[in-house]
């Protein structure tokens, strides 16, 4: 088997696949929430090596993908200002706003810089006291401690030239929304291991209760994903719904408490628009009033910018598992990673981008499996 | 930027009240903030996300993850030292 050789330990992978196949008696639809998991699944062909009954639905697991168009327009507006150095994770630069992307602003003369960490942005601010340095803070719970810390450091050091455009999204409310949808097809959720390493697993018990749906906290490496799936199928076949942790080597129930405390200081929960999905109540973090002076939306007066989403793009359905990326009319035609219509095509962790990179290039997949 | 990468702590120092470390990720070295893992020491392995250690991890699974990032060819990208990261 072509794909199996690529696992860290093909022997363990083989055993896990065999156990899953043996247990599976009925069709199940399982959503992996983390973009890293989607990437692992597609790249290693896990979905193709599983029994036909098991369908994997790629969830909204890429914070880049779900960042609303209006927020990107705000970023573009701020980044184009001559007094601003705009800093961001690299993934955000190609995400299309209404008219262009951050790369466009950069080639038009804007000072847009890719940073690895928000602390790098703080450093740039210290080195450029005559400039306003803005950091584009997107991400799930995993990234929030880092972003929160950069604001705390800026406050402690009394910096008046560092601010943040924040658009954080939270996983549990997204699971809640998907599970509550009348069209929901998901029988079980693999929760994102790295999110839980920060937030712990305690937020997921109530969701298991409410929807009677199994949730298994799962890592992103191929063998972790397989172990998560094995535990998931075991629950589904036994007809139980429990919270299980298949990533205990990293995730503990209470999570990282110092990180959670800092997050609670710097951010507050808010309703948040998800690109393609729409508004999910209480599903985001924004900068709390105590740190408002560091909020770029206030500092640059861009709070009112909003933008309607593209009508062509069906990423909303893709993100909810109602449509496979290649079932979208525009997939691979008008919409490619070079000309992304929707944010799900922008990053290789987005469902459409992952499909494009690792599926389409291997179209005669069956041949490779022998 | 979604994933977190494990690395080994080679040196710890104080930077104006912030506990910082040099962490070795399979040959690539980075400055990382340790404020969220106060109990961690030199020689330990930590999972690092965008410049911050977010949890401790044992050596064996750290090695496994690093091998995987190498095979996927995404270690540089996750650590922001790829061709796009020209900051
Ligand atoms: S293929 Fe492109 S247009 Fe279609 S849903 Fe995905 S991102 Fe949107």
Image (cartoon, rainbow, N blue to C red):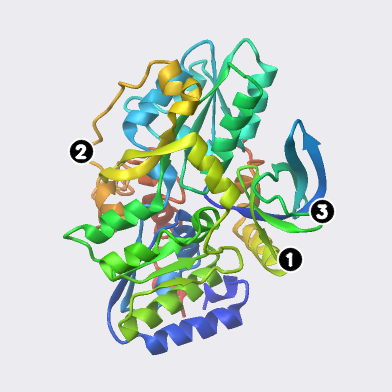
Label 3 element class: loop
Which class describes the residues within 10 Å of circle 3: few (<14), some (14-19), or many (20+)? Answer: few
For the residues labelled 2 and 3, the Cα–Cα distance comes to: 53 Å
Q: Nearer the viewer, mark 2 or mark 3?
A: 3
Q: Answer with the quarter of the image where residue A77 lies.
A: top left
Q: Which chain contains the residue that carries disc 1?
A: B
> Going 27% across and 65% down the picture, which residue do you hit?
A210
User: Which residue does the numbered mark 3 point to in the structure image?
Assistant: B42
Residue highlighted by disc 1: B59
Q: Residues within 10 Å of mark 1 (few under 14, many from 20)?
A: some
Residue A2 vs residue A32: left or right?
A: right
Graded by Cα atoms within 10 Å as few (under 14), some (14 to 19) or many (20 or more), the crowding at tag 2 reads few
Residue pictured at 55% horizontal, 36% vertical: A148
Quarter residue B83 falls in = top right
Asked if residue A103 shows in the view, the reply is no
Residue denoted by label 2 = A311
Q: Left or right of A324: which side holds A349?
A: right
Viewer-proximal residue among A207 and A311: A207
How far is the residue under mark 1 from the one under mark 3? 13 Å
**Is ligand 1 less than 8 Å from the beta carbon at label 3?**
no
Which callout, 1 or 3, points to the residue nearer the camera? 3
Numbered disc 1: secondary structure: helix
């Amino acid at each position: 088997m072509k794909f199996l050789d690529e696992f860290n330990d093909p022997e363990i992978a083989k055993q896990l696949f065999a156990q899953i196949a043996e247990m599976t008696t009925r069709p199940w639809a399982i959503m992996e929430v983390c973009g890293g998991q989607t990437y692992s699944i597609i790249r290693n062909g896990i979905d193709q090596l599983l029994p036909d009954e098991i369908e994997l639905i790629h969830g909204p697991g890429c914070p880049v993908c779900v960042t609303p168009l209006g927020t990107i327009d705000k970023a573009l507006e701020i980044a184009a200002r001559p007094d601003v150095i705009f800093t961001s994770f690299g993934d955000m630069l190609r995400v299309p706003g209404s008219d262009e992307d951050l790369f466009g602003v950069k080639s038009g003369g804007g000072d847009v810089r890719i940073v690895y960490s928000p602390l790098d942005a703080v450093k740039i601010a210290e080195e450029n006291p005559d400039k306003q340095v803005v950091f584009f803070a997107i991400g799930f719970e995993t990234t929030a401690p880092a972003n929160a810390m950069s604001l705390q450091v800026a406050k402690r050091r009394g910096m008046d030239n560092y601010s943040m455009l924040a658009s954080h999204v939270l996983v549990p409310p997204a699971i809640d929304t998907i599970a509550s949808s009348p069209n929901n097809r998901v029988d079980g959720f693999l929760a994102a291991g790295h999110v839980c390493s920060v937030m712990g697993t305690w937020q997921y018990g109530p969701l298991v209760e409410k929807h009677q749906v199994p949730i298994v906290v799962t890592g992103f490496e191929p063998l972790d994903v397989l172990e998560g799936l094995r535990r998931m199928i075991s629950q589904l076949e036994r007809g139980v719904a429990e919270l299980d942790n298949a990533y205990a080597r990293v995730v503990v129930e209470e999570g990282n408490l110092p990180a959670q405390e800092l997050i609670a200081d710097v951010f507050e929960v808010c309703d948040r628009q998800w690109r393609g999905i729409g508004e999910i109540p209480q599903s985001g973090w924004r900068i709390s009033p105590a740190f408002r002076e560091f909020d770029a939306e206030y500092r640059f007066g861009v709070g009112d910018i909003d933008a309607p989403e593209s009508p062509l793009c069906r990423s909303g359905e893709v993100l909810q598992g109602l449509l496979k990326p290649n079932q979208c009319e525009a997939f691979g035609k008008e919409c490619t990673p070079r000309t992304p219509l929707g944010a799900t095509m922008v990053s290789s962790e987005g469902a459409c981008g992952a499909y494009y990179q690792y599926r389409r290039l291997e179209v005669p997949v069956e041949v490779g499996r022998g | 930027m979604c994933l977190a990468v494990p690395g080994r702590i080679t040196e710890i120092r104080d930077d104006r009240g912030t506990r910082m470390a040099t962490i070795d990720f399979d040959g690539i070295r980075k400055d990382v903030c340790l404020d969220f893992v106060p109990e961690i020491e030199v020689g330990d392995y930590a999972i690092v996300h965008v410049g911050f250690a977010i949890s401790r991890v044992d050596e064996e699974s750290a090695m496994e993850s690093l091998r995987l990032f190498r095979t996927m060819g995404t270690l540089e990208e996750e650590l922001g030292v790829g061709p796009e990261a020209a900051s």
